[in-house]
Image (cartoon, rainbow, N blue to C red):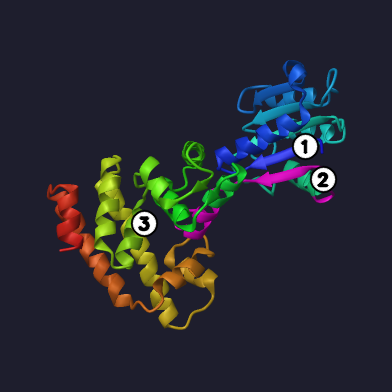
């Protein structure tokens, strides 16, 4: 397959896929001649990638042209698009053009449409590595499991949750910590994670989740971790307010019998309707009055912060007092 489209913001997974392909097709003895690393953000390098990909490999092995930050499927200029389409059928089977971008390909572009047509026909290949959203707990656990499997490690169930709590969606750190843990054992336990990783990766949405579950101790720990990491207190409050306001809207519309997730998402100001399914499970059995109460307490936290209270005191006294 001459063209490999690799996208997604999971940089560690992208790099594993790229390195695996390089090891598979490029003869190390001839890598200096048959392996090119280019940057599509640099002037002329995207066009250079097309030219090099059309060149057969030298000596043994195959040629691989790696183009980071590829423009071909994300905002491609007309002249470059013309060159790309002309090159699609000219790349020999012994050459590989690897197009890498953290953004999802723009399906409206003619270059993307042309490449997707070839991918559907089995002529080229696409791999996607998106990171899960901060609210997607199941997705974060899958990320941990998938990374461990790629490294040949086994994780106990509690260890998966411990790694999610400690690292979140930082895929590069996740891989680094798993490699460190593998030096002790190929089967990773929660105790081993606590011993060697520790820490608490968090975000404002997880503070809200702790409040929703009635766990003030966890909420305080996550608030303090955010403050220690340099997150502005008023920004945390703003995020929490938006989160709880979304819960309130979903709860009210559910109470009114609305079942269309697109309608609920629009009313709640939530961009991804799929999130409504997750929120429904979170909010099950919780009345709207609870969210109104939380919003009122957040206003008190904000008022205390603006009067000069220390962030920790404002949170404890305003929201949990």
- N-terminal of the pair, mark 3 or mark 2, is 2
Is residue 138 rendered magenta in the image? yes
Q: CA distance from mark 3 to mark 1?
A: 40 Å
* Range covered by the magenta-colored residues: 120-142
Question: Which badge, 3 or 1, is on the more N-terminal residue?
Answer: 1
Describe residue 199's horizontal placement relative to residue 104 as left or right.
Answer: left
Q: Position of residue 175 (x, y in %)?
A: 52, 39
Q: Which residue occupies 12% across, 47% down?
A: 308
Identify the image quadrant of the C terminus: bottom left
Q: Which residue is mark 2?
A: 118
The answer to whether residue 36 shows anywhere in this view is yes
Q: To which residue does mark 1 refer?
A: 3
For the question of whether residue 136 can be seen, the reply is: no
CA gap, disc 2 and disc 1: 9 Å
Residue in view at x 64 percent, y 40 percent: 74
Other residues around mark 1 within 10 Å, as few (<14) / some (14–19) / many (≥20): many
């Amino acid at each position: 397959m001459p063209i490999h489209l690799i996208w997604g913001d999971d940089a560690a997974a992208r790099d594993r896929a790229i390195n695996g392909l390089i090891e598979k097709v490029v003869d190390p003895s001839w890598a200096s001649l048959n392996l090119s690393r280019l940057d599509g953000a640099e002037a002329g390098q995207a066009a250079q990638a097309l030219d090099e990909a059309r060149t057969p490999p030298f000596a043994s092995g195959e040629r691989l042209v790696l183009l980071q930050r590829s423009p071909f499927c994300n905002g491609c200029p007309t002249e470059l698009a013309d060159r790309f389409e002309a090159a699609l059928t000219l790349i020999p089977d012994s050459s590989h053009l690897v197009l890498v971008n953290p953004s999802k390909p723009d399906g409206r572009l003619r270059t993307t449409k042309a490449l997707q047509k070839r991918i559907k026909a089995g002529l080229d290949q696409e791999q996607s590595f998106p990171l899960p959203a901060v609210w997607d707990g199941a997705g974060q656990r899958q990320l941990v499991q998938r990374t461990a499997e790629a490294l040949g490690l086994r994780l106990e169930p509690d260890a998966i949750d411990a790694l999610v709590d400690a690292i979140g969606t930082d895929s590069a750190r996740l891989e680094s910590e798993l490699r460190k843990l593998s030096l002790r054992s190929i089967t990773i336990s929660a105790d081993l994670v606590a011993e060697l990783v520790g820490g608490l990766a968090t975000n404002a949405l997880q503070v809200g989740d702790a409040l929703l579950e009635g766990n003030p101790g966890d909420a305080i720990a996550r608030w303090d971790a955010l403050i220690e990491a340099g997150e502005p207190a008023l920004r945390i409050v703003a995020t929490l307010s938006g989160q709880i306001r979304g819960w309130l809207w979903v709860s009210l519309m559910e109470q009114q019998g609305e079942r269309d997730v697109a309608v609920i998402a629009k009313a709640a100001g939530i961009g991804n309707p799929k999130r409504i399914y997750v929120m429904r499970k979170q909010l099950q059995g919780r009345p709207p009055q609870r969210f109104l109460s939380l919003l009122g307490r957040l206003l008190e936290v904000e008022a205390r912060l603006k009067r000069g209270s220390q962030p920790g005191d404002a949170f404890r006294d305003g929201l949990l007092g």
